[in-house]
Image: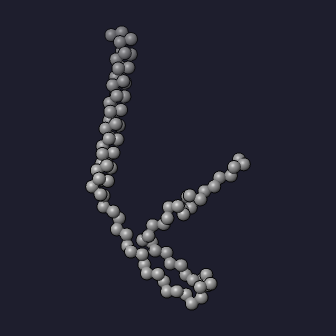
Amino acid sequence: MSESELVARATRRLIYMALCLGALCTAAILVTLRADAQSQAHGAPQAVVAPPPAPPAKAEDPARTDAAITDDATIAPDPHESADNNVSFPVDI
């Protein structure tokens, strides 16, 4: 075999491998999207959220601000109030 035939064979092999890899990736994406669509269509089980706790008893002095604030760990925080959303960058750099 000549050198040009070996180079052509290697090139064809690389093209076939690239096509197989592309088909494999496409199939994986389609399987993932189909599984996601099926889980949404059948109503994936929702997380059970405990009812909010009863409001604490009112303080005698409404102007008093040193009252203890209780944080319920079962309630997710509001994503709009996250510290990640309050990042600012200097514009003078």
Seen in the picture, residue 57 relative to 34 is either above or below; the reply is below
Residue that extends furthest to the left in the rendered view of this protein: 42
Question: Along the horizontal axis of the image, is 88 left or right of 36?
Answer: right
Q: Position of residue 75 (x, y in %)?
A: 44, 70
The quadrant where residue 34 appears: top left
Q: Position of residue 81 (x, y in %)?
A: 54, 63
The correct choice, above or below, for 14 with respect to 22 in the image is: above
Identify which residue, 62 or 65, lies in the foreground. 62
Work out whether residue 80 or residue 82 is closer to the camera in this orientation and state it.
80
- Residue name at image x 37 percent, y 15 percent: 8
Which colour style is shown?
one colour
User: At 34% across and 41% down in the image, what residue appears?
Assistant: 29
Locate residue 11, reporting x and y percent.
Answer: 38, 20
Q: Is residue 4 above or below residue 71?
A: above
Residue 59, by quadrant, is bottom right
Numbered marks: total: 0
Question: Which image quadrant for residue 85?
Answer: bottom right
**Nearer to us in this view, 81 or 9:** 81
Q: Please, which residue is most extreme toward the top here? A: 2
Q: Is residue 69 shown left or right of residue 50?
A: right
Residue 18 place in picture, x, y as percent: 37, 28
Residue that lies at the very extreme toward the bottom in this rendered image: 60
Which residue is pictured at 32% across the width and 33% down the height? 23
User: Viewer-proximal residue, 9 or 86?
Assistant: 86
Residue at the limit of the structure toward the right, as seen here: 92
The quarter of the picture where the N terminus appears is: top left
